Image: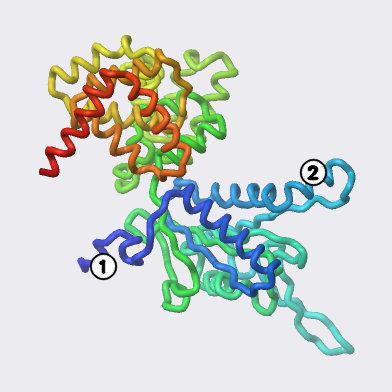
Amino acid sequence: MSTQKELKYFERLNIGVLSIEKIKTLIKNDIKNTIFAWKEGYNVDKQCFHIIGPAGVGKTEICKQIADELTEELFGSWNKRVESGDEKIEKNFDMIMVKAPVLSRDDFIIPFPVLDNGNTSFKMLYSDFVPKDKDSVGIFVIDEFSRGDHSLQQLLWQVQNEYKVHLYDFPEGWFVISIDNPDDSEYQTDSMEDAAGLRRMLHIYTEVSTPDFLKYAIDKKFHPTVIEFIQTHPDYLYDFDSQKQGAVYANPASYEKLSHHMWKFQISGGIENHYSDIDIFASGLLNVNKARLFLEFIKEGKDINPKDIFFKYKLVRPQIQMFKTEGDNASLSKIMNSFVTYLVSSKPEFTDKEQANVALFLIDMPLDCAAIFVTSIDTFDRKSDEFKYATTLHVSLMKNPKYKEMFYEAIVSCGKDANT
């Protein structure tokens, strides 16, 4: 096996890796900046983006969010006037999504014979997949381009590179996004990676991001059991091992479907009356192993819920102290990771009581596990809401003399010792 085949797909392409939320912001801002530059008289080019990432990570969903958010950000004030009766036509930033694996070239363009003075000629008929309103704006999303047949890929190359189909130019305000799974062993793809195609698109790889998923889940009001399960077990969000084995595997999209079912069970007799049904649904969406863990989580509550650390630490403190006495730093590290995940995703309000709980928890932890609290927070963008929340909490905790001495100063001292 060659070295190239052993590399991950983003390493083979030598491209950057970003969170799905960062990619959404990057593309949305680029589209807005392009439109604003045109209005100022700058003839800048549009950028075709190629998003690559594992199945179920949210690539399709962010395209929908981009269209919805640009409708509000570009036309929100206009549409409010329409609602009040001052204008007549509502404006939208539209989206057309095509699924390459289930389409053919003829779904886009068909030559149609016409008679002109007794002579037969052909006129090209373009399908509804092709945007035709010259005044419209939107994104044309090509889903799973690399799984389309060869002739369709050739046509879609033209869409991505020239913003046109055959001789028909897309309206100026239409942008193109192509999304794909990586060309790895887990996926069946047929990529057309010629040099021209690679140079004309901006390629970005996205990996699974638990904070991004939880932010989305909380915003979309996922069922609390799903949110708390991932907050407690961030490493359960994507089951790469099962995916590699060709089995059903947990992923962000499957947890969203599970959340919908949990709400249905909630309103039709309550969760506790549907455990057998939940087992069936969760097994089919996540796999049997993850379903068992999910059911144990909601039925028995054996896992330390990070929310309990924050609000009821005395209740779970004996378990923390037991792990510490046994020297089980692996379990304590997982608990610390889940606690940080809970904090930055839920951003719960805190009083003196909650501050005392957090301070005591951090003091109880072995230093190497406690350091995860600091290092994890340090990975967030300084301007992000997550970093601001964690910093505000830390500043409040510093008013506690024991926290300052037994956690903060101990961490600082440990860091100095490691550097000497």
- Residue 230 seen by the camera: no
Occupied quadrant, residue 172: bottom right
Residue assigned mark 1: 4
- The location of residue 76, given as percent across then percent down, is 73, 47
Q: Element under label 2?
A: helix
Closer-to-camera residue (337/252) = 337
Q: Residue furthest left?
A: 420
2 vs 1, front mark:
2
Closer-to-camera residue (396/127) = 396
Q: Earlier in the sequence, mark 2 or mark 1?
A: 1
Badge 1, how many Cα within 10 Å: few under 14, some, many 20+? few
Residue assigned mark 2: 80
Amino acid type indicated by mark 2: Lys
Tell me which residue sits at (59%, 47%) in the image.
65
Tell me which residue sits at (41%, 38%) in the image.
387
Amino acid type indicated by mark 1: Gln
Measured in 3D between alpha carbons, the distance from the residue under mark 2 to the one under mark 1, in whole angstroms, is: 54 Å
Above or below, 184 against 405 in this view is below
Closer-to-camera residue (87/374) = 374
